[in-house]
Amino acid sequence: MSIIDYIEFSFIKGIGNRSIKRIYEEFGNLSLPLSNPEVLIEKFGKSVYLTIKNRPLELREKAEKEYELALKKGFSLVSLADEKYPQLLKEIPDPPVYIYYKGKLPDDKSISIVGSRKFSSYGKTITTKFVEKLVNDGVCIISGLAAGIDSIAHSVTLENGGNTVAVLGNGIDQIFPYENKKLYEKILENGCLISEFPIGTKASKYTFPIRNRIIAGLSYGTIVTEAGEKSGALITAKYANEYGRIVFSVPTNITNPYGKGNNLLIKEGAIPLTEIEDIYEHIPYFNKNNFVENIQLSEEEKKILNVMTEPIHIDTVVEKTGIPYGKLINLIFEMELKDLVSNVDGMYIRKI
């Protein structure tokens, strides 16, 4: 199945991401309903069928040109059908049909840190504190490359040798705000850039809320370190809550205008974040030190974890560890129960 099919599908007006996900899950791909729309009638109705059947013929050429342009500019694309597509993002109700990216895509040991463009010295200090500790435990930091708290989160991650992902509210080839040009370039070299918007798309007040759902979707939880009561960071937190992800909010002085949104979130049920242990209490596998101290590993379990430096097929685990297949199946099953590893689309991933 071609990535072009997914790009073309995304260009069809009148079919949103939620509907597209349902169609994808029904057929396991988008190529079949695109080439044979009649299969949609029974479960999705005549309206959806006609919308796809009568789509403009030029959409195919437009999709092909979009794909070629992205590659020419040095960016990659990954669709819902690709094993590389981030699993956490695929789980939300309205994931992008495909995304543009450059760099290493995040795994499920990821958390988003967001806040306002305007911030206090307290906001900068607290953001730096939590980012440094999370990076030390190998947690990927996701944010939106906006001025302010987002930029601090990205910069501190890079300064500490961590992995950061910037989700853009514009085309992946566009830099916004332009003052973040150097940061954009650093992430391009040492992190990961992600966007769902076509090449050349300019940032606007409409694109940022759309972008925010991806930040929440890619993350196991969302941390708001400092945000005003009308900050876009609250939109990200709202999405995270809707998606069943954990929302953390740093309490702030009630006279701090830059942090009114934080206290509002706590009133609405967000977890007050005052120390790193608050995060580890709700996402324990983020803390590698606690894990090592509290769980005893057998030599075979250590050997298995050591080869899982990236998503890996069980046959490769057998080859690299020398553990017989039958025994390995039992060991991995026990390790899944201990929350040490997870199976994502047939590939095994270590969770610590």
Image: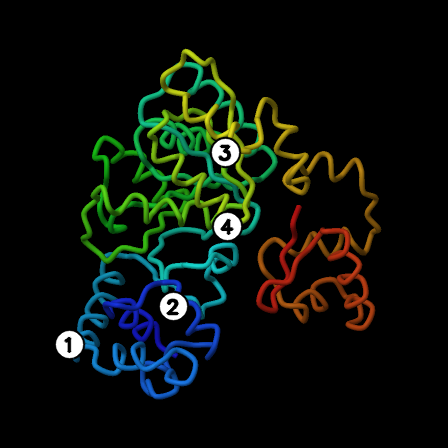
Looking at the image, residue 103 lies above or below residue 253: below
Does residue 183 appear left or right of residue 89 in this picture? left
Mark 2–mark 4 contact, CB under 8 Å?
no
- The residue that label 3 is drawn on is 223
Question: Which residue ends up furthest to the top in the rendered image?
Answer: 255
Q: Nearer the viewer, residue 154 or 304?
A: 154
> Which residue lies at the image location 73% right of the left edge and 35% below the top edge?
290
Q: Nearer the viewer, residue 84 or 235?
A: 235
In the rendered structure, find residue 211 and report the number of the disc placed on it: none
Disc with the residue nearer the chain's start (1 vs 2): 2
Residue type, label 3 = Ile
Q: Which x, y percent locates residue 150?
A: 38, 32
Q: Nearer the viewer, mark 1 or mark 4?
A: 4
Count neighbours of disc 3 (C-alpha within 10 A) and say few if under 14, some if 14 to 19, many if 20 or more: many
- The residue that label 2 is drawn on is 19
- The residue that label 1 is drawn on is 58
Residue type, label 4 = Tyr
Give the structural element (helix, strand or loop) at label 4. loop
- The residue that label 4 is drawn on is 243
Looking at the image, residue 273 lies above or below residue 192: above
Q: How is the image coloured?
A: rainbow
Mark 1–mark 4 contact, CB under 8 Å?
no
